[in-house]
Structures are given as structure tokens and as C-alpha cells.
Image (cartoon, rainbow, N blue to C red):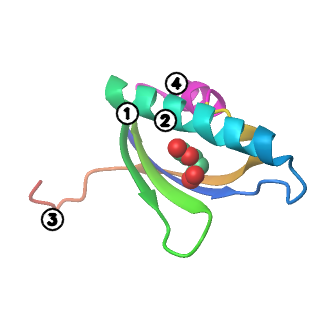
């Protein structure tokens, strides 16, 4: 099942710069790992915002929840999940 996840990242303005750099690096590595697994099929930056639009391919809502909560920045996310169904006019 495909899910579109719209994520706003709300990092604390007063986060220590070394802690922030570490968090960004562990987030990057986990995002790469999930993309390589085939479960995280698209990751797009929303231009001009600390936000992304991600497409996940998961077996269930529970698996999606597990993947999202495995991202180190999860505590700083505000997100909206949109389950995707096939459009009858889509040729893909
Ligand atoms: O920067 C972000 O949008 C947050 C996050 C989601 C995946 C990733 O690598 O970083």
C-alpha cells in the first residue's frame, strides 16, 4: 500500500549545534537505509520550507507507523498521512 506522508520538521531553535548536526546525520542515515529497503520510495523537499513529502510502500498502517517512528527526527515532526488508491485514469 502506498502512503503519501507530508512532514513538517519543527526543530527547537535553541538546539545545541553539535546535537543538531548529529541528529541530521543519524536522520540522513536512517532515511537512506529505509530508501534502500524499498519501503521509502520517494523523498522530496518542499521548496522553501523545512518540510518534505514522502511516499512509503508498506504492508499496513502499523508498518508505516513503525517506519515513521524509527526516524530519529520523529519527535519533531508534525505530519499528515494520506493513503493512496489507484486512480482509474492513471496509465502507470
Ligand atoms: O529533513 C527532513 O525533511 C526530515 C527528514 C526526513 C527524511 C530525512 O532525511 O530528513
Q: Is residue 53 above or below residue 59?
A: below
Magenta stretch: helix, strand or loop mostly: helix
**Image quadrant containing the N terminus:** top left
Check disc 2 and report the residue beneath it. 31
CA gap, disc 3 and disc 4: 29 Å
Which callout, 3 or 4, points to the residue nearer the camera?
4
Mark 1 surroundings: few (<14), some (14-19) or many (≥20) residues within 10 A: some
CA gap, disc 3 and disc 2: 32 Å
Check disc 4 and report the residue beneath it. 63
Q: Position of residue 50 (x, y in %)?
A: 62, 63
Mark closer to the chain start, 4 or 2 = 2
Describe the element under mark 4 as helix, strand or loop.
Answer: helix
Contact? badges 1 and 2 (CB < 8 Å):
yes
CA gap, disc 4 and disc 2: 15 Å
Q: Nearer the viewer, residue 11 or 39?
A: 11
CA gap, disc 1 and disc 2: 6 Å
Q: Is residue 71 a member of the stretch shown in magenta?
A: no
Mark closer to the chain start, 3 or 4 = 4
Q: Label for residue 89?
A: 3
Report whether the residue tagged 2 is closer than 8 Å to ligand 1. Answer: yes
Q: Is residue 80 visible?
A: yes
Contact? badges 3 and 4 (CB < 8 Å):
no
Contact? badges 4 and 2 (CB < 8 Å):
no
Q: Residue furthest right?
A: 14
Residue positioned 78% across, 41% down in the render: 18
CA gap, disc 3 and disc 1: 28 Å
Describe the element under mark 3 as helix, strand or loop.
Answer: loop
Q: Label for residue 35?
A: 1
Q: Is residue 36 above or below residue 54?
A: above
Question: Where does the magenta region start and end?
Answer: 59-70
Mark 4 surroundings: few (<14), some (14-19) or many (≥20) residues within 10 A: few
Mark 3 surroundings: few (<14), some (14-19) or many (≥20) residues within 10 A: few
Amino acid at each position: 500500500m502506498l502512503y503519501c506522508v507530508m512532514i513538517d520538521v519543527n526543530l527547537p531553535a535553541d538546539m545545541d549545534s553539535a546535537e543538531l548536526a548529529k541528529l541530521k546525520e543519524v536522520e540522513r542515515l536512517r532515511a537512506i537505509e529505509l530508501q534502500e529497503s524499498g519501503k521509502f520510495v520517494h523523498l522530496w523537499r518542499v521548496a522553501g520550507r523545512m518540510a518534505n513529502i514522502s511516499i512509503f510502500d508498506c504492508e499496513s498502517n502499523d508498518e508505516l507507523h513503525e517506519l515513521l517512528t524509527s526516524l530519529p527526527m520523529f519527535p519533531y515532526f508534525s505530519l499528515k498521512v494520506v493513503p493512496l488508491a489507484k486512480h482509474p485514469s492513471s496509465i502507470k
